[in-house]
C-alpha cells in the first residue's frame, strides 16, 4: 500500500483511539490493518498463533448519537474503501447486534455476508464497549424546530448535534445558506414596495417560527389566489428562499397521510403548497379539502396502532401553511368551520415582468440567509417576552377591526404583523426591542390594507353577498340588455343579436353563458355560487322555465336557456 494511503488510514485510527480509550480488550482480540480486520487466536501463554481475517475492509465505530424523542441510541460507522474513509448510514444499537440488519451494510460496499456476519457483530460489540466512554454522546435531530429555547436547523452552529431527516431532499433544501445578503435584501425591498400582498406573503414565511414562541394555538393556513401568470408561484418561490432552495416548495397532488408526514418534518417552518386549484380534478374535492384544512390547522394527524397493536404516537406539528391557487378553495358546503381556518388573500394585479424575473434570479442564487438571521433574534429573548408582545399586537388589531373579521383571522394577522416588525429590526441590524413599536406602526399600515381586502367568511355563506355584486355587474352592462313588452308579450330588441338578456318588472333574465361569465369575477366555482343564490331564492336556473312560460323568442332562439334573477328595481325602456 502506498505511504500516503497508510498515513490516511492510521491518522484516522489515532484520532479515534485517543489515550483516554480503554483498548485492552480490543487489542487482545483484534488487529486492525489497512487490508482488513483480523481476529487474534492466542494460546494458553497469550501468544498469537493465528490471525483470522474477518472482513477485507476495515470498519470503525466513530460516534454515538442519542435521539431523545424515542430514546434510541444510534452509532456512526465508517468504512475504509477506495483509499479513504466513508461514512455509512446511521444504525441503532439493535441493528448492529443482529445478523440480518448488519448484512444490509453490504449495500454500502461493506464486506459482510452470512458467513462472517456473527464475527463482525462480535467485533463491533467489543469496539463499542471500548469507545462508549471515550466518545461523547451527541444529540440526534430527526425533526426541525424548537427544542427549549433553541431552534434546531441545519447549517447553524449546533455543537454535538447530528441531523438525520427522513427526507433527504428537505435536508438538501435547507442544509446551507448561499448568496449575498444585500443582493437578496434588495429584491425583497423592491417586492415589498411593489405589492402589499407580496410583503404579506413574505411575512407569513417569516412568522412560522413565531408560532410556538408566542404559544399560538393551531397551524394557520394562508391562500394567495389570483389569475394565471400574475406571479403567485414566483412570490412563493421567493418566500421559500427565506429558508432554503426552491426544493422547499411542494406540489398539491398528495394524500392526507403524505401531507401529515410532511408537516411533521416541517414543524416550526412554513409549508409551501403550490397550484392548489389542481386538486379540483379530484372527484371528492369538497370532502378532501375540508379534511385537509381541518387537519393542517389543528396540527395533529390520525391515531394509529403499531405492529404490536399498541397505540402509536400521534404526529404533531406547528407550521404556517402557505398555499397558492388560481381560485379560492372554499365552497358553500363547508364555509363554516373550514372557512374560518383559512385566510384567503387575493392578488389584485400581476407583478411586473421585470420584477418576476428578478425574484426568480435572486431566489435561485441567494437563499437560506434571512431565516437564519430571524432565528438568531428570536432566540435572543425568552418566549415569555414574545408572548407579551404578541398579546399587545392582538389587542391593537382587535380594537382597530371593530368586529369586522373573524377572531381567528385577527390572531393570524397579528402574528404576521409581529413577524414584519421583528424582521424590520433584522434588516436594520438592530437587537433592541425598544424600537419595536416604531416597526409595528409601519407593519400596521400594510396589515390594514390587507384587512380591507379580506372577505369575511360569514358574508360568503349567504347568496345576498353575490347577488349584490351581480346586480352591480348587470347595471354596469345596462346597454347590453333588452326589455320585455307586456302588451305584445315580446322582447323589444335594441342591443342587437348579441343581447345579454332582458328586463321584466323587477327581474332580469340573463343568457346562461353570459351569467357564467359574470360569475368569473369572484374566482370561485360557479356552481357553488349558484347553489347559494338558488337557496336564497334569488335566481331561477331551470333551463329557461320563465321564457317557456311567456313563449318568448330571444336571440333568434325559441325559449333559450336563461337565468332569471331578482334585480330589486324596475327598469323601463
Image (cartoon, rainbow, N blue to C red):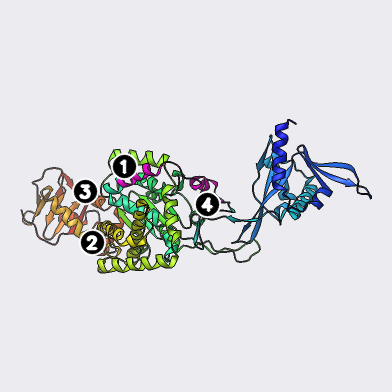
- The secondary structure type at the circle numbered 2 is helix
User: Which label sits in the foreground, 4 or 3?
Assistant: 4
Tag 2 residue: 465
Q: Which residues are magenta?
A: 164-189
Q: Residues within 10 Å of mark 3 (few under 14, many from 20)?
A: some
Tag 1 residue: 229
- The secondary structure type at the circle numbered 3 is helix
Residue 458 in the image, given as x and y percentages of width and height? 29, 65
Labels 1 and 3: the sequence-earlier one: 1
The magenta stretch spans residue 538: no
Residue 478 in the image, given as x and y percentages of width and height? 11, 51
The magenta stretch spans residue 173: yes
Tag 3 residue: 514
Query: Residue 157 has which mark?
Result: 4
Labels 4 and 1: the sequence-earlier one: 4
The reply to whether residue 223 is visible in this rendering is no
Identify which residue, 329 or 535, lies in the foreground: 329
Q: Is residue 274 left or right of residue 538?
A: right
- How far apart in space, not on screen, are marks 3 and 2 (Cα)? 19 Å
Q: Residues within 10 Å of mark 1 (few under 14, many from 20)?
A: few
Residue 108 lies in what quarter of the image? Answer: top right
Labels 3 and 2: the sequence-earlier one: 2
- How far apart in space, not on screen, are marks 4 and 2 (Cα)? 54 Å
User: Which label sits in the foreground, 3 or 2?
Assistant: 2
The reply to whether residue 473 is visible in this rendering is yes
The residue located at (66%, 41%) in the rendering is: 86
Q: Is residue 79 left or right of residue 157?
A: right
Amino acid at each position: 500500500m502506498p505511504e500516503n494511503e497508510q498515513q490516511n488510514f492510521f491518522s484516522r485510527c489515532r484520532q479515534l483511539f485517543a489515550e483516554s480509550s480503554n483498548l485492552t480488550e480490543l487489542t487482545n482480540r483484534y488487529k486492525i490493518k489497512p487490508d482488513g480486520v483480523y481476529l487474534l487466536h492466542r494460546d494458553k501463554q497469550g501468544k498469537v498463533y493465528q490471525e483470522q481475517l474477518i472482513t477485507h475492509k476495515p470498519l470503525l465505530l466513530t460516534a454515538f448519537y442519542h435521539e431523545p424523542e424515542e430514546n434510541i441510541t444510534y452509532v456512526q460507522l465508517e468504512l475504509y474503501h477506495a483509499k479513504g474513509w466513508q461514512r455509512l448510514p446511521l444504525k441503532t444499537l439493535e441493528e448492529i447486534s443482529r445478523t440480518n440488519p448488519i448484512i444490509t451494510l453490504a449495500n454500502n460496499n461493506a464486506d459482510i455476508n452470512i458467513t462472517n456476519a456473527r464475527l463482525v457483530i462480535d467485533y463491533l460489540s467489543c469496539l463499542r464497549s471500548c469507545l462508549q466512554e471515550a466518545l461523547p454522546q451527541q444529540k440526534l435531530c430527526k425533526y426541525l424546530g424548537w427544542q427549549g429555547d433553541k431552534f434546531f436547523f441545519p447549517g447553524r452552529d449546533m455543537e454535538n448535534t447530528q441531523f438525520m431527516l427522513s427526507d433527504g431532499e428537505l435536508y438538501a433544501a435547507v442544509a446551507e445558506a448561499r448568496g449575498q445578503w444585500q443582493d437578496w435584501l434588495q429584491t425583497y425591498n423592491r417586492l415589498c414596495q411593489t405589492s402589499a400582498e407580496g410583503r404579506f406573503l413574505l411575512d407569513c414565511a417569516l412568522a412560522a417560527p413565531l408560532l410556538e414562541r408566542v404559544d399560538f394555538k393551531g397551524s394557520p393556513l394562508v391562500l394567495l389566489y389570483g389569475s394565471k401568470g400574475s406571479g403567485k408561484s414566483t412570490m412563493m418561490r421567493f418566500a421559500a428562499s427565506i429558508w432554503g432552495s426552491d426544493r422547499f416548495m411542494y406540489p398539491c397532488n398528495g394524500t392526507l397521510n403524505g401531507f401529515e408526514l410532511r408537516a411533521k418534518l416541517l414543524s416550526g417552518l412554513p409549508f409551501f403548497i403550490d397550484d392548489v386549484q389542481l386538486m379540483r380534478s379530484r372527484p371528492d374535492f369538497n370532502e378532501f379539502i375540508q379534511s385537509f384544512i381541518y387537519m393542517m390547522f389543528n396540527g395533529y394527524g390520525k391515531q394509529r396502532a403499531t405492529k404490536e397493536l399498541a397505540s402509536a404516537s400521534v404526529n404533531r406539528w406547528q407550521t404556517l401553511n402557505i398555499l397558492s391557487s388560481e381560485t379560492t378553495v372554499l365552497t358553500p358546503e363547508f364555509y363554516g368551520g373550514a372557512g374560518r381556518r383559512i385566510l384567503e388573500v387575493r392578488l389584485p394585479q400581476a407583478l411586473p415582468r421585470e420584477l418576476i424575473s428578478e425574484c426568480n434570479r435572486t431566489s435561485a442564487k441567494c437563499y437560506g440567509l434571512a431565516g437564519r438571521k430571524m432565528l438568531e433574534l428570536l432566540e435572543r429573548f425568552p418566549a415569555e417576552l414574545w408572548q407579551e408582545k404578541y398579546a399587545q399586537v392582538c389587542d391593537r388589531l382587535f380594537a382597530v377591526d371593530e368586529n369586522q373579521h373573524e377572531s381567528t383571522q385577527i390572531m393570524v394577522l397579528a402574528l404576521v404583523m409581529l413577524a414584519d416588525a421583528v424582521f424590520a429590526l433584522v434588516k436594520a441590524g438592530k437587537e433592541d426591542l425598544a424600537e419595536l413599536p416604531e416597526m409595528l406602526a409601519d407593519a400596521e399600515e400594510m396589515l390594514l390594507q390587507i384587512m380591507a381586502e379580506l372577505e369575511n367568511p360569514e358574508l360568503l355563506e349567504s347568496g345576498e353577498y353575490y347577488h349584490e355584486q351581480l346586480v352591480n355587474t348587470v347595471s354596469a352592462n345596462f346597454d347590453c340588455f333588452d326589455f320585455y313588452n307586456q302588451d305584445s308579450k315580446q322582447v323589444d330588441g335594441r342591443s342587437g343579436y348579441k343581447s345579454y338578456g332582458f328586463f321584466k318588472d323587477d327581474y332580469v333574465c340573463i343568457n346562461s353563458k353570459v351569467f357564467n361569465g359574470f360569475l368569473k369575477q369572484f374566482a370561485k366555482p360557479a356552481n357553488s355560487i349558484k347553489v347559494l343564490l338558488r337557496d336564497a331564492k334569488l335566481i331561477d336556473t331551470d333551463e329557461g322555465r320563465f321564457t317557456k312560460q311567456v313563449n318568448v323568442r330571444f336571440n333568434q332562439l325559441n325559449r333559450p336557456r336563461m337565468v332569471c334573477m331578482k334585480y330589486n328595481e324596475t327598469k323601463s325602456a
